Amino acid sequence: MAIERVREYLKTFGMEGKILEFDVSSATVELAAAALHCEPCRIAKTLSFLVNGYAILVVTAGDTKIDNPKYKAQFGTKAKMAPPQEAETLVGHAVGGVCPFAVNDGVKIYLDQSLKRFDTVFPACGSSNSAIELTIGQLEEYSGYDGWVDVCKIQ
């Protein structure tokens, strides 16, 4: 199970005990915000895309959507989300629990500028009913991110 992979991964940072698991689904921004009793914008949603046949992840604030011209300028191609049925194979996590931790080798991780307005955010932890509260610095460190991007617009 992916949450166990994430738990093992976060153990290397002493953070495995900080994972929150819910009795309800947190698979969407709205459901996660309800489970966490926080604003939807503070949910760090992780989106999986295909770029030249390879999977990448973009972690962005919950109140954003991809800005296609910005995305194309950044990655040199039109935004194409990984098909939900292929996300687990490509990334290591199923849709609803995709997160920037314990991903498959070769998956690049980008953090969107929209996250920088918050002290802490809540990314998922590999399942459709989990999250962890992290500072932006912790998100950078624990995700092993490849860089900051500006590919979103606030809805």
Image (tube, grey):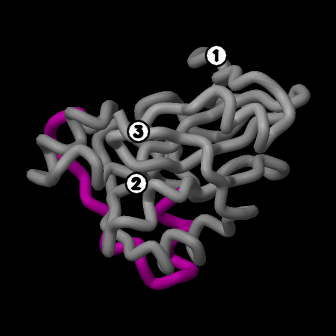
Above or below for 105 versus 95: below
Q: Residues within 10 Å of mark 3 (few under 14, many from 20)?
A: some
Residue 138 or 74: which is nearer the viewer? Answer: 74
Where is residue 69? Give x, y as percent: 68, 30
- Report the mark closest to the observer, 3 or 1: 3
Q: Which residue is mark 3?
A: 64
Q: Is residue 116 magenta?
A: no
> Picture quarter containing residue 93?
top right
Residue at position x 40%, y 49% in the image: 61
Q: In 3D space, how far apart are the residues under numbered discs 3 and 2 (Cα atoms)?
A: 14 Å
Q: In 3D space, how far apart are the residues under numbered discs 3 and 1 (Cα atoms)?
A: 20 Å
Q: In 3D space, how far apart are the residues under numbered discs 1 and 2 (Cα atoms)?
A: 20 Å
Residue 107 or 127: which is nearer the viewer? Answer: 107
Are dots 3 and 2 in contact, CB under 8 Å? Answer: no
Q: In terms of secondary structure, where does tag 3 sit? A: strand
Residue at position x 16%, y 36% in the image: 24
> Picture quarter containing residue 16?
bottom left
Are dots 1 and 2 in contact, CB under 8 Å? Answer: no
The circle drawn on residue 123 is 2
The outermost residue toward the right is: 52
Please give left or right for residue 88 compared with residue 133 in the image. right
- Report the mark closest to the observer, 3 or 2: 3
Q: Report the span colored magenta.
A: 6-25
Q: In terms of secondary structure, where does tag 2 sit? A: strand
Amino acid at the residue labelled 2: Pro
Whichever of labels 1 and 2 marks the residue nearer the N terminus, that label is 1
> Picture quarter containing residue 155?
top left
Where is residue 151? Give x, y as percent: 61, 43
Q: Which residue is mark 1?
A: 83
Q: In terms of secondary structure, where does tag 1 sit? A: loop
Where is residue 89? Give x, y as percent: 70, 29
Whichever of labels 3 and 2 marks the residue nearer the N terminus, that label is 3
